[in-house]
Image: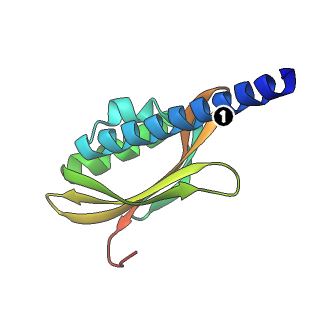
Amino acid sequence: MRLLLTSLFIMLLGVGSITAQETTADHIANLIRSGNTNELSKHFMNNIDLTILNTDDVYSRAQAAQITRRFFDEHTPTGFTINHQGKSKLDDHYRIGTLTTENGNFRVTYFIKNTDGKFLIKQLRIESNNRDF
């Protein structure tokens, strides 16, 4: 009986972790949809793998926030739709979606990772949407 209760408790902890990760991933989608870089950058890891159009490198949170802000200043979002979601072999959750802006559509991919109990964006990619997925 004790083993059963312990197993049940561990399973519930896992479900809570998945729910928190899913909630964070959905919250990030809403921040992208609104172009809210101030709040979005709070979800960046200290160093984030960032690709925005022709800019591609690992940046500090502050640098990534500036680059992301510049993109959203030039491409005002009008919507964001998640097209695919899943979990990588490294247990990172990801989303792939289409960002619609006043200047066209873009493919957005982001990975979030559990870091010290907080789910943060480890990779964000915003690319021209010239291919279907």
Judging depth in this view, the residue of 104 and 8 nearest the camera is 8
Picture coordinates of residue 85, whole percent (x, y): 47, 57
Residue found 51% across the figure and 59% down from its top: 56
The answer to which quarter of the image holds residue 117 is top right
Name, please, the residue furthest toward the top. Answer: 2
- Label 1: which residue? 14
Looking at the image, residue 117 lies above or below residue 111: above
Total of numbered circles in the picture? 1
For disc 1, the neighbor class at 10 Å (few under 14, some 14 to 19, many from 20) is few
Is residue 61 visible in this depiction of the protein?
yes
Amino acid carrying label 1: it is Gly
Looking at the image, residue 88 lies above or below residue 20: below
Judging depth in this view, the residue of 26 and 112 nearest the camera is 26
Q: Quadrant of the N terminus?
A: top right
Judging depth in this view, the residue of 37 and 86 nearest the camera is 86
Name, please, the residue furthest toward the front. Answer: 1
The answer to which quarter of the image holds residue 126 is bottom left
Residue found 52% across the figure and 53% down from its top: 94
Residue 89 located left or right of residue 131: right
Judging depth in this view, the residue of 35 and 67 nearest the camera is 35
Residue 131 located left or right of residue 45: left
Picture coordinates of residue 35, whole percent (x, y): 26, 42
Helix, strand, or loop for circle 1? helix
Name, please, the residue furthest toward the left. Answer: 102
Residue 107 located left or right of residue 34: right
Name, please, the residue furthest toward the bottom. Answer: 131
Picture coordinates of residue 31, whole percent (x, y): 32, 38
Residue 44 located left or right of residue 70: right
